[in-house]
């Protein structure tokens, strides 16, 4: 009877050890699955942020187009209007704008403004900084970009 009890105890011990091992593996797999889920969720959130940033970047796209030696057109090639637009020289020695507005209440998508531009004496930089808002009331942070004029032909 003692031998039967010993065999049954041994089998119970082996079964308990196997159950503990299986539970440990299951717990490890659950942790790994949770970790992978968190990584996937972060990747999805990052992709969504990148998509939103890309969409925002396409909303307002300012470019200069040279139409003659000293005339350029500033265009908004984006899909939305820009508000509170300010055009400023990017650095000392930047081109001098002889005619054309430097501020706009609204600059509509697809619109263009003509400038007569000549380089300052000895200047080789042809860049401006342009700032604008997406919101009409300008409650959003100002966006800033450096835009470069194409070279003279």
Image (spheres, helix red, strand yellow):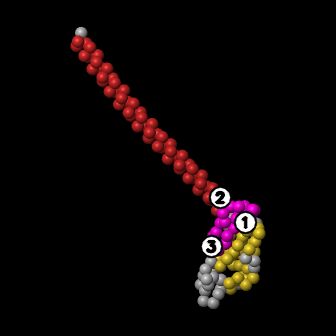
Q: Tell me the SS state at disc 2.
A: helix
If you read the primary sequence from the N terminus, does the residue marked by circle 2 or circle 1 appear first?
2
Q: Tell me the SS state at disc 1.
A: strand
The C terminus: image quadrant = bottom right
Magenta extent: 129-153
The picture places residue 26, in percent across and down from the top left corner, at: 41, 33
Q: In this figure, which residue is indicated by the disc labeled 3?
A: 146
Q: In this figure, which residue is indicated by the disc labeled 2?
A: 55
Neighbours of disc 2 within 10 Å: few (<14), some (14-19), many (20+)? few
The picture places residue 29, in percent across and down from the top left corner, at: 42, 37
As rendered, which of 88 and 48 lies closer to the eye? 88
Distance from the alpha carbon under mark 2 to that under mark 3: 19 Å
> Outermost residue, left direction?
3
Q: Does residue 141 appear in the picture of this structure?
A: yes
The picture places residue 65, in percent across and down from the top left corner, at: 69, 75
Q: Nearer the viewer, mark 2 or mark 1?
A: 1
If you read the primary sequence from the N terminus, does the residue marked by circle 2 or circle 3 appear first?
2
Q: In this figure, which residue is indicated by the disc labeled 1?
A: 82
Distance from the alpha carbon under mark 1 to that under mark 3: 15 Å
Neighbours of disc 1 within 10 Å: few (<14), some (14-19), many (20+)? many
> Measured along the vertical axis of the image, is residue 108 above or below residue 128?
above
Residue 73 inside the magenta-drawn segment: no
Q: Residue at x 72, y 70 (%)?
A: 85
Q: Residue at x 75, y 82 (%)?
A: 99
Q: Are marks 1 and 3 in contact (CB under 8 Å)?
A: no
| Circle on res. 91 | none
The N terminus: image quadrant = top left
If you read the primary sequence from the N terminus, does the residue marked by circle 1 or circle 3 appear first?
1
> Outermost residue, front direction?
139
Q: Residue at x 67, y 70 (%)?
A: 131
> Outermost residue, top direction?
1
């Amino acid at each position: 009877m003692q031998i039967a009890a010993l065999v049954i105890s041994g089998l119970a011990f082996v079964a308990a050890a196997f159950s503990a091992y299986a539970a440990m593996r299951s717990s490890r797999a659950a942790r790994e699955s949770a970790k992978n889920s968190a990584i996937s969720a972060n990747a999805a959130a990052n992709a969504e942020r990148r998509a939103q940033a890309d969409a925002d970047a396409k909303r307002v796209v300012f470019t200069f187009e040279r139409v003659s030696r000293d005339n350029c057109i500033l265009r908004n090639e984006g899909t939305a209007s820009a508000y509170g637009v300010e055009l400023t020289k990017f650095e000392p020695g930047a081109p001098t704008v002889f005619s054309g507005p430097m501020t706009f209440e609204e600059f509509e998508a697809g619109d263009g403004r003509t400038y007569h531009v000549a380089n300052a004496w000895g200047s080789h930089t042809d860049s401006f900084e342009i700032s604008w808002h997406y919101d009409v009331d300008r409650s959003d942070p100002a966006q800033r970009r450096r835009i470069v004029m194409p070279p003279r032909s």
